[in-house]
Image (cartoon, rainbow, N blue to C red):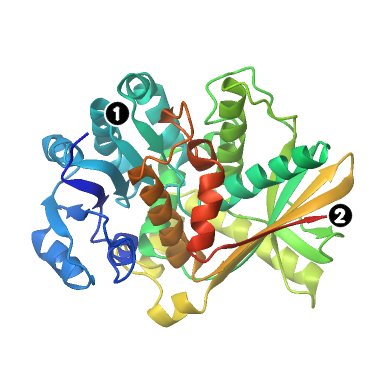
């Protein structure tokens, strides 16, 4: 397939889109990669291009004019999109990639939107050979990949994991695009959809497992208190889709339960876990009604805004996946990296995954809507290690 570009970054003038454009064109990095940036505003795109070490070409494309999206898609192997909320701006890009057999990646956490895209475009994508890989940022690669590594490690030692809990430690800020996407989900989707662990699984007979634990809890393996993690329902749905897709390929996982938690400081652990749980509940209440959403939009970051360079530099992400078998801890998988999780980390994850797609480093038989681990398997771990991520598996 001859194309003008390897990767087109759509939504390049937004906060994360600008960072991704700079990431993929920085000096000494992926020198041979043919990158273009796309959006609807020529002047803003020129400003983004001017901020890049290697100047990308510019494409004018607008999701409100699907013909411009189709023209953009036909010029590239891979579209990496940051134009959210994806439920508003995403469908024309998905539709064009499925139609023309191009590969698609995004950083969405909008599971109801992706389920609707699966229902509409999976069959066409399978026919054209398009690979569509949503959830390729901080939502939800750490969850998808640590579970993949834990299950593989358990198989190598001949035991079965039936309970997996991923504990996050993060420091970072919120950008306006992420906030707007979260509010759009709350406004247009029911709580039942968002918290449905099987929302990404078309099979109505696939088991659902127990309800999540939404209370503060002490984790004896880590000796830390924890609260529910705010992205847990989304990441859980992606982990479960990966397992379902592997089963369709004949690689059946032993049944396991999965949940996510956020650990708090050692001092006043029960109090901090209770406060964190309360803050999460408060955000849910505010985002669940129009007045609360108005307040969050008024006082939160606006689309295009995000943390300062200094704040992003001082951020970090650490994940510890505790794997149990019949109640006994058998292993811990650790994944970590410096940088703001929702911005720097998510950019590195999305851009490196897009590079793998541009290199056609897909696992055999990967097509249609797939998850990052189903798309790339062990290649994803190797690439992320080269990008500064650290992994360690400890057997207990």
Q: Nearer the viewer, residue 178 or 48?
A: 48
Could you tell me which secondary element the residue under label 1 belongs to? Answer: helix
The quarter of the image holding the C terminus is: bottom right
Q: Residue at x 34, y 66 (%)?
A: 29
Residue 233 point in image, percent of width and height? 60, 44
Q: Nearer the viewer, mark 2 or mark 1?
A: 2
Using the image, determine if residue 299 lies above or below residue 124. below
Residue wearing tag 2: 396
Residue located 39% across and 78% down the image: 308
Q: Quadrant of residue 302?
A: bottom left
Name the residue located 46 percent from the left edge and 45 percent from the top edge: 135
* Residue 40 screen position, x and y as percent: 14, 52
Left or right? Give the position of 28 relative to 325: left
**For residue 151, above or below residue 299:** above
Could you tell me residue 182's position as x and y percent? 44, 51
Q: Which residue is mark 1?
A: 98
Q: Residues within 10 Å of mark 1 (few under 14, many from 20)?
A: many
Q: Is residue 139 above or below residue 369?
A: below
Q: Is residue 59 above or below residue 312?
A: above
Q: Earlier in the sequence, mark 2 or mark 1?
A: 1
| Residue 212 visible, this orientation | no
Q: Residue furthest front?
A: 32
Residue 154 appears in view: yes
Distance of label 2 from label 1 (alpha carbons)? 44 Å
Residue 21 drawn at (x, y percent) = 28, 62
Left or right: residue 374 versus residue 166 is left
Mark 2 closeness class: few <14, some 14–19, many ≥20 residues within 10 Å: few
């Amino acid at each position: 397939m001859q194309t003008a570009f390897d990767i087109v970054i759509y939504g390049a003038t937004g906060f994360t889109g600008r960072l991704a454009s700079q990431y993929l064109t920085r000096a000494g990095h992926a020198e041979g990669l043919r990158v273009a940036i796309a959006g609807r505003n020529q002047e803003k795109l020129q400003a983004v291009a001017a901020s890049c070490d290697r100047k990308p070409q510019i494409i004018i494309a607008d999701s409100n004019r699907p013909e411009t999206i189709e023209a953009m898609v036909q010029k590239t192997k891979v579209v990496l999109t940051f134009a959210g909320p994806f439920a508003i701006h995403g469908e024309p890009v998905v539709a064009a990639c499925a139609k023309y057999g191009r590969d698609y990646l995004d950083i969405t956490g909008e599971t109801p939107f992706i389920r609707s895209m699966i229902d509409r475009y999976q069959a066409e994508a399978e026919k054209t050979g398009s690979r569509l890989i949503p959830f390729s940022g901080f939502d939800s690669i750490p969850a998808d990949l640590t579970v993949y590594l834990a299950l593989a490690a358990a198989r190598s030692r001949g035991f079965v994991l039936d309970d997996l809990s991923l504990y996050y430690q993060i420091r970072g800020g919120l950008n306006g695009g992420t906030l707007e996407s979260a509010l759009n989900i709350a406004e247009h989707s029911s709580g039942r959809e968002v918290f449905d662990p099987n929302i990404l699984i078309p099979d109505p007979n696939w088991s659902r497992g127990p309800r999540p634990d939404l209370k503060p809890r002490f984790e004896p393996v880590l000796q830390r208190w924890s609260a529910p993690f705010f992205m847990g329902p989304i990441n859980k749905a992606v982990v479960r889709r990966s397992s379902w897709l592997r089963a369709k390929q004949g690689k059946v996982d032993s049944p396991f339960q999965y949940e996510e938690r956020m650990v708090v400081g050692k001092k006043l652990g029960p109090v901090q876990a209770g406060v964190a749980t309360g803050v999460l509940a408060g955000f849910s209440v505010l985002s669940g009604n129009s007045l609360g959403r108005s307040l969050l939009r008024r006082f939160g970051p606006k689309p295009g805004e995000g943390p300062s360079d200094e704040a992003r530099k001082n951020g970090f992400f650490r994940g510890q996946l505790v794997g149990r078998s019949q109640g006994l801890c058998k292993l811990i998988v650790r994944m970590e990296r410096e940088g703001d999780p929702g911005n720097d980390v998510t950019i590195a994850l999305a851009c490196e995954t897009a590079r793998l797609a541009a290199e056609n480093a897909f696992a055999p038989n990967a097509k249609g809507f797939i998850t990052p681990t189903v798309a790339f398997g062990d290649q994803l771990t190797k690439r992320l290690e080269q990008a500064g991520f650290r992994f360690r598996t400890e057997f207990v």
